[in-house]
Amino acid sequence: MLNQFRRFTAAVCITAMIAGVVIPSTASARGESFINSTDSEANNMTSPIMLDLIVLRPVGLAAMVVSTVLFVAPVLPLTLITRPTEIAKPWKALVVEPAQFVWSDPLGTH
């Protein structure tokens, strides 16, 4: 059973890597680009915004909650005991950056 799961995971990873190489190269061969889009293609630009709004922001919100809990429970006491002057480093990495991702970054930029 474990061997089948590993084979399936390897097949999915290989398919994703091949798609990551083939899809952008075929789009560039056809001259498609989001950067040089015309007005008729401007309506298709909403898909990155919708992906960001529907998928990435809720995942970011959950990650922000988990990282804040991790900061408060094990990281804060250990940092205050071992090196209290460097409390800003884990605060920024575990609380501020996830909060900026969720609340202040513009939609569609991720």
Image: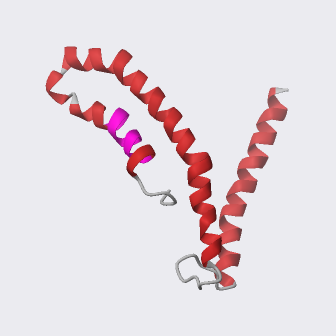
Q: Residue at x 81, y 41 (%)?
A: 8
Q: Which residues are magenta?
A: 93-101
Nearer the observer, 12 or 69: 69
Give x and y (percent) for residue 53. 57, 51
Instruction: Look at the picture and state if 69 lies above or below 25.
Output: above
Q: Residue at x 33, y 21 (%)?
A: 75
**Would residue 87 appear left or right of 58 to someone viewing this image?**
left
Magenta span: chief secondary structure: helix
**Would residue 70 appear left or right of 51 to someone viewing this image?**
left
Q: Residue at x 48, y 60 (%)?
A: 109
Instruction: Look at the picture and state if 67 lies above or below 81.
Output: below
Q: Residue at x 68, y 77 (%)?
A: 27
> In the image, is residue 94 part of the stretch drawn in magenta?
yes
Instruction: Look at the picture and state if 60 lies above or below 35.
Output: above
Nearer the observer, 53 or 91: 53
Q: Quadrant of the N terminus?
A: top right
Give x and y (percent) for residue 104. 38, 50
Give x and y (percent) for residue 62. 52, 33
- What count of labels does the image hold? 0
Give x and y (percent) for residue 73. 37, 16
> In the image, is residue 81 part of the stretch drawn in magenta?
no
Q: Quadrant of residue 72?
A: top left
Q: Quadrant of residue 41?
A: bottom right
